[in-house]
Amino acid sequence: MSSELENIAAQFGSLTVHSNPAVCRVVLTKVMRLQMNGTDCAQLLPGMLKLLAHPDLVTKKAVYHFTALYANKNPEVSLLAVNTLMQECSDSNPVIRGLALKTLSTLNHESFIEYGLRGINMGLTDKSVYVRRVAACCCGRLYKQNVDMYNDGRLINQLYTMLRDSDPIVVVNSVMALEEILSKEGGIVINRNIANHLLNNLQGMTPWGQSYVLNILQKYKPKTQDELFNMLNILDTFLVSNHTAVAEACLQLFLSLISNLPHLRPQVFKRYIKNIVAAIPHGNTELVFHILDHLNSFRDEIKAELQPHYLIFFCKESDPLYLKKLKLAVLPHLALENNAKEILGELFLHASNPSKEVSLGALEAVTVVFKSNPTTAPTVIKKLKQLIDSEAPHLLSNIFQVLKNLELNTIDEGPDIIMKIADKHRKLTDTEGRLAFLCLLSQYGNLLEESPYILEEYVENFQNETNSIIKYQILMTCVHVFFHHPAAMQGILGQILELCLQDSDKSIQSQALFYYRLLSNDVRHAKMIISTETRALQ
C-alpha cells in the first residue's frame, strides 16, 4: 500500500497531471478509491496542494475536499493552501468563491480560524446569492471550532442584517447560524419585524427551510389579536402543505399561537387532518409511521376528526412490525357502533399473528373496544373462546394477559372462560403468560373448583422455580385462593408459606412472614387487608 501511495505522490509532480485534466482526474480517482478503502492518504497532501489553482472545476472540488479532510493532521503544510484559498475567495467565478470559502471554514485547526473569519466577512457581502448562502452556513461551522470568536458581536449583527436578504435560502441559513451561535442565550431573538419578514418570505424557501423557520417562529408571541390573525392567515396555506414536515411544523406553530384561544383548536385540527390523511396511501413506510405517530399524540382530542378515516389504520400485509403495532394501538379508539364490528374483524385477524407483539397488541385493542362498546361483548367473548382452543403458546399467553384486565365475574360466560383457560395453563411457557394465569386464579378462584389442585402443582415445583416474580405471584395467589377454598387450601398454604420463609430471596421471605402474621392474627381482617392491597396493585 505504501508503494502505491509513493507512486501516486510521484505522479503529482508530473507536468502531464497539471496540464491534462483527464489524466489529473484519473490520479484523483485512485486517491479517492484508497480513501474509501480506509487508507490514510495524508502523505499525499503536499502534492495535492499543488493542484489547488488547477483550472478544472472537478479537480478543484476534489482537491478542496482532500485539503479539508487532512488539514488538521498536517497544519504546517496546509498553511500553504490558505493564500490560494483566500485569493480564490475573490475569484470572478462565484462557484469557485463559494467552494474556497467552504473549504476555509472546514480547515479544522485554530491556525486557520482567522482566515476563515475574513473569508466569511467577504462572503456575507458578496453579490452572488450562492456565496452568501455558503457564508451564512460557514458561520455556524466556524463557531463549533472556536466558541469565543463571536464575542465582539460584529458578526452576529451582520447575521441579523442578513435576515433581510432578498434570497429566502440566505435568510434560512442566517437563522440557522444565529440559532446555533446564540444557543447558550436561548437562540435567535424574534421580534415583530423579523417574524413578519420570515412569514412573508416563507413561500420562497425550500420545504426544509419552511419547517425549520416555522419551528423557530414558535418563540414569537403576537402582541395583539389583529397581529395574531394576520399571522394565522399567512400560515393557513402551509397547514395544508403537500410536504408533511411543513404541515406538521405549521400545526405546532398554530397550536402555540392559539394557546389562549382553545375554541379554535378543533377547526385547526380538522383542516390539518383532512390534508394529512391524503398523504398516507401514497407515502413510504417511514413517512406513514411518522404521520400516524403524530396523529396518535393528539388522539383523544382529534378522535372525532379521525373516526371517518379509521380505514387508514387497518394493517397491510407489507407493513413492518413497528407500523402494525402503532396502527393496532390507535384503531380501537376510533370504534363506533356503526364500525365496531368491522374494526373487531381487523383486530381478531391479527390476534393470531405469528409475531407475539402484534398478537398482543391486537388483543389489547380488542379489550379497549369491548370496554367502550358494550354491545360488542357477545362477539368478543365468542371469538376469545375460539382463540383459547389454539395450540400456539404465544397466543395463549397473550389471551391470558388480556383476560386479567376484563371483569370476567360480570360476564355471563365468565365461568366458562375460566374453565377453558384452566385446561390450557400447562401449555404456557413464558413468564408473562404464567403470571397472567396466576393473577386470573387470584381474581376468579371462586369460579373454579379445581384452583387448589392447580396451585398444588405450582407449589410442588416451587423449589425448581428460578423466577422470583413467579414465586411471589404463587404465594399471593395461594393466599387469595385460600379465602375462596379454605378447606382445600389450608395444607397447601402452610406448605407455600414454609417454602417462602426458607427462600433465598429476602423480599419473598418478608412477604411470606407478613401474610403469616396477618392470617395468624385474624383471617377476616387479613382478607380485607389483602383484598385492598390487591386492588391498589391493579
Image (cartoon, grey):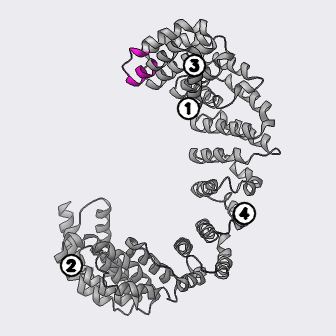
Residue 471: percent from the left, percent from the top? Answer: 47, 20
Q: Which residue is mark 3?
A: 525
Give the residue at x 53% y 21%: 476
Give the alpha-carbon distance from disc 1 to disc 3, as whole Å. Answer: 19 Å
In the depicted structure, whether residue 259 falls above or below residue 223: above
- Res 538 seen here: no
In the depicted structure, whether residue 334 falls above or below residue 520: below
Residue 265: percent from the left, percent from the top? Answer: 69, 65
Q: Nearer the viewer, residue 61 or 456?
A: 456
Residue 100: percent from the left, percent from the top? Answer: 33, 83
Circle 1 Cα neighbour tier, 10 Å, few/some/many (<14 / 14–19 / ≥20) = few
- Res 471 seen here: yes
Give the alpha-carbon distance from disc 4 to disc 1, as whole Å. Answer: 37 Å
Give the mark, 4 or 1, whose residue is nearer the N terminus.
Answer: 4
Asked which secondary structure carries label 1, the reply is helix
Image quadrant holding the C terminus, namely top right
Chief SS of the magenta region = helix
Circle 3 Cα neighbour tier, 10 Å, few/some/many (<14 / 14–19 / ≥20) = few
Question: Of the residues shown, which amino acid type is indicated by label 3?
Answer: His
Question: Of the residues shown, which amino acid type is indicated by label 4?
Answer: Pro
Q: Which residue is mark 4?
A: 266
In the depicted structure, whether residue 252 falls above or below residue 508: below
Asked if the magenta segment contains residue 315, the reply would be no
Give the alpha-carbon distance from disc 3 to disc 4, as whole Å. Answer: 52 Å
State the extent of the magenta-drawn residues as a range: 500-512
Give the mark, 1 or 3, whose residue is nearer the N terminus.
Answer: 3
Q: Which mark is residue 537?
A: 1
